[in-house]
Image (tube, rainbow, N blue to C red):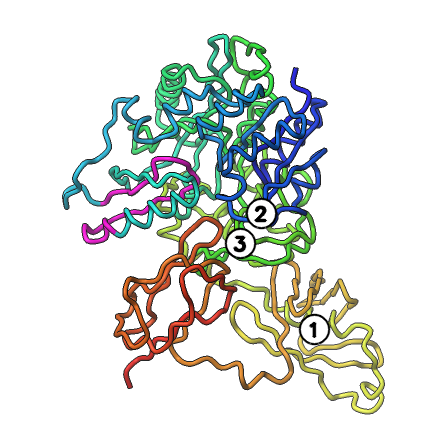
Amino acid sequence: MISTLLVANRGEIACRIFRTCAELGIRTVAVHSDADENALHARVADSAVRLPGATPADTYLRGDLVVKAAVSAGADAVHPGYGFLSENADFARAVLDAGLVWIGPPPEAIEAMASKTRAKELMGIAPLGEVTEADLPVLVKAAAGGGGRGMRVVRRLDELDAALEGAGAEAASAFGDGEVFVEPYIERGRHVEVQILADTHGTVWPLGTRDCSLQRRHQKVIEEAPAPGLPDGLTEKLYALAVRAARAVSYTGAGTVEFLVDGTEAHFLEMNTRLQVEHPVTEAVFGIDLVAEQIRVAEGHALAAEAPPARGHAVEARLYAEDPARDWAPQTGTLHRLAVPGGVRLDTGYGDGDEIGVHYDAMLAKAVAHAPTRAEALRRLSHALEQATLHGPTTNRDLLVRSLRHEEFTTARMDTGFYDRHLAGLTAPAPDPHAPLAAALADAHGRSRFGGWRNLSSQPQTKRYLMADEEHEVHYRHTRDGLAADGVRVVHADAHLVVLDIDGVHRKFAVSRYGDRVHVNATALTALPRFPDPKAQLAPGSLLAPMPGTVVRIAEGLTEGDSVEAGQPLMWLEAMKMQHQITAPVTGTLSELRVAVGQQVEPGSLLAVVKAPL
């Protein structure tokens, strides 16, 4: 029996595994980087071991340090979570060689499936060799890892070399393996997968299907179980292929076999030899705890002959600290408050007041709703997200709500190109027009009224806010009866709650302020100073960092004074394990280059200036 378990991971998945361990009576050990010293997963574990450094390469990807931590903390088992070393056969062997229990499949199974190229060979599928015009579009893909990192869609042959280089660099940074390969890219396919669970006694459960078609940059955003609207007979075919893949490598534990479905055809993509981010939807539908089952399998217990019956439908949405309207730019800063209404499962690696940094994935949490039908699950989850309290950096919350309510999604006609087609509409600003007034009234609550209604009763007060990139000016007055504003009746106003009578309907506005950042219900605003700083003007053609990150590459030979074309790549920033290309905004001359390779930048930092010809 396992008594103490170390999780070789961080954030949400570590916290989720610790929760199951607590229910099973297993002591827990966390590992943490210097950047994660006060992270939630390090706080909730029974004990924690430091991994010196901040970057994944120095910490969570150092298998030798993780094994040493497990031994020193007295752990007798290691769970890898997902990402990082979860599909590293050498790490699994090192855990076993140290006399510890490995919560995962045998190293040989990981080795057989960890490389997507070798997995395809095992399933009788060969990757593309030399790419020609007839093969386009193609997908450049990292052989190791997952999470969409190291992927590039190529539609023109002259873009292939750059895509191979970029994907390889990103894969090496995220997984320590820069191998990439090329495969055909199916434009309107659905991403469907099968969860499997296998024991050491020969039993393999196919635990239903999941649809993960809503993706940005090949990373999943919304997942559900079961996959809706599959053609007759396809589910059974997917089950058979998944079980075949598991048996081919003598698999044990939890794993996922992924497919791209094109009509009635299923194309094998890969087998993930680990727990998936989206495993909670399967847990909800089958009424099981997959982490608990992983642990029991590792302890040698046998599964029942048949999997439990499925019930209802479950949907999961990933909350990211990112701005979908700005090329999915990751965001950093303090997460002041995160709360979702009851009835929805929330898996998170953050607590109120935690800092969202630059070193790791931008996912804040996963929200999961389960209901008897798909329509009810979608309604429950979209409503919960809409009502969620999210105070801090910009998130993708509005995108998630709109996606869950989009007609193409509600009718199950989505595919992996959903965001390519609909992103502009899903990210169009739709702020609450009364939010600035509510913010101003909450701010005015309790302020001195002397000289207000007594001397200048009709003199309005003015406040300015930035909302959805537009400046809004609002006016209100202090009167004998309290605060007043034109066009509405102020029913109630204090520092945290404003109630306005708008056309006979009382509307409530919850207001929270953190410095100059104000949250009014689900709308975020920035309070502007009364008198703008005249120095805060930027030269035309200024390129600002859209996110915090590190300058990992500058275009070869690029120097100040060079002529550049609009759209020409100038440099690359790496943030949260993803690389982002910075291009010239106009055709002109690079008059200033303010950064160098290796330099850390904050959002809004001046990177370069491109001066257009007069």
Whether residue 492 is visible to the viewer of this picture, yes or no, is no
Please say if 145 is above or below 488. Answer: above
Q: Which of pointers 1 and 3 lies earlier in the amino acid sequence?
A: 3
Nearest to the eye among marks 3 and 2: give it: 3
**Residue at image location 40% in from the left, 42% down from the top:** 148
Residue toward you, 178 or 325: 178
Q: Which mark is residue 274?
A: none
Q: Which of pointers 3 and 2 lies earlier in the amino acid sequence?
A: 3
**Residue at image location 59% in from the left, 31% down from the top:** 68
Nearest to the eye among marks 2 and 1: give it: 2
Q: Which residues are magenta?
A: 137-161
Q: CA distance from mark 1 to mark 3?
A: 33 Å
Please say if 52 is above or below 70. Answer: below
Location of the N terminus (image quadrant):
top right
Residue matched to label 1:
440
Left or right: where does residue 519 sit relative to residue 613?
right
Q: Are marks 3 and 2 in contact (CB under 8 Å)?
A: no
User: Residue 552 colored magenta?
Assistant: no
Q: CA distance from mark 2 to mark 1?
A: 29 Å
Q: Report the amino acid beneath label 1.
A: Ala
Residue matched to label 2:
364
Q: Which of pointers 2 and 1 lies earlier in the amino acid sequence?
A: 2
**Residue at image location 61% in from the left, 29% down from the top:** 70
Q: Report the amino acid beneath label 2.
A: Leu
- Residue 174 at x, y percent in the picture: 44, 43
Residue matched to label 3:
358
User: Residue 156 colored magenta?
Assistant: yes
Residue toward you, 426 or 532: 532
Helix, strand, or loop for circle 3? loop
Q: Are marks 1 and 3 in contact (CB under 8 Å)?
A: no
Left or right: where does residue 163 sit relative to residue 44?
left
Dot 3, how many residues are within 10 Å of its Cα: few (below 14), some (14-19), or many (20+)?
many
